[in-house]
Amino acid sequence: MGQLLEVWATDRGAPADFKAWCQQTDQKFLGVLEADGYLRLFLKKVVVDTKEKGKLFDCEMSNEELARRLATGERLTILDVREPEEYASGHIPGAHHVPVEEIESYLAKLARDLPVAVVCRSGRRSGYVCQILRREGFTQVYNVVPGMTGWTGALETPAAVGDRP
C-alpha cells in the first residue's frame, strides 16, 4: 500500500481511463503532467487487492438498445467521447464528437430534456463522462456498453459527413 505508479502515455484519453479505473478500484489518481509529447499519469495504490467494483455508472444502455432507439427515430443525443483519431475511424451516425477533456466546456450545448447516450471504445471513458453529466444535473444519462468495440450498426467517417459535428 502507498506505492506510487507513473504511467507514460500518448493517448489523450488515458487520463480519463485511469481516473475511471481508480474510481472502480478505490485507488487514487494523483494527476497528470505533459512533457516531451507524453502524458505522465501518477497513481497511488491505497488498497491491497485491486478488484473492480462493477459498473462504473448505474444507468447503462446496450449497443442493441441504442440501435433500436435510433431505428425508431427516438430523439436523443449521442456523445462520442473518444479521441479524434478513434472518432475518425468510424462513429455512430449523428454522434457529437466531444473528447473527454472537452466535456466541461460542452455542457451548455447539450439539451437537458433529451436522453444522452455516451459512447467510447469500451465503456470506461463514457462512464466517467456520465458521472460528470449527472453531477451537473442531467437526469437522462446512459453509458453505452460495451461501446464501439461491440457496435455492429452503421458507421460514419468524417470524410463521409464533412467535418466534426
Image (cartoon, rainbow, N blue to C red):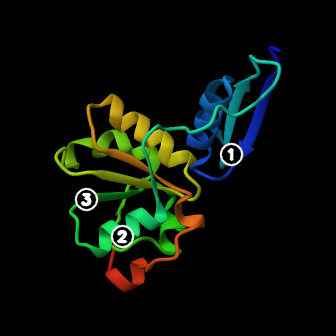
Name the one closer to the observer, 46 or 109: 46
Q: Nearer the viewer, mark 2 or mark 3?
A: 2
Determine whether 36 is above or below 50 in the image.
below
User: Which circle's residue, 3 or 1, is located before the other in the chain?
Assistant: 1
Q: Toward which corner of the image does residue 48 lie, by quadrant? A: top right
| Disc with the residue nearer the chain's start (2 vs 1) | 1
Q: Do the residues bearing badges 3 and 1 touch, measured as CB atoms within 8 Å?
A: no
Residue for badge 3: 76
Q: Return the x and y of residue 74 as percentages of the image width and height.
A: 23, 65
Viewer-proximal residue among 92 and 87: 92
Q: Which residue is mark 1?
A: 36
User: Residue 156 lies in what quarter of the image?
Assistant: bottom left
Q: CA distance from mark 3 to mark 1?
A: 40 Å
Q: Is residue 44 left or right of residue 61?
A: right
- Depth check: 64 or 127 in front? 64
Q: Position of residue 109 (x, y in %)?
A: 21, 49
Measured from the top left, where is residue 3 in percent x and y?
83, 19
Q: Quadrant of the C terminus?
A: bottom left
For the N terminus, give its image quadrant. top right
Front tag of 2 and 1: 2
Q: Residue at x 71, y 27 (%)?
A: 43
Q: Residue at x 65, y 49 (%)?
A: 37
Identify the secondary structure beneath mark 3. Answer: loop
Instruction: Indicate the position of residue 72 as horizontal and vertical percent values.
Output: 26, 73
Q: How many marks?
A: 3
Q: Earlier in the sequence, mark 2 or mark 3?
A: 2
Amino acid at dot 1: Asp
Q: Residues within 10 Å of mark 2 (few under 14, many from 20)?
A: few
The secondary element bearing badge 1 is classed as loop
- Where disc 2 sits, the SS reads helix
The amino acid beneath tag 2 is: Arg
Which label number is shown at residue 68?
2
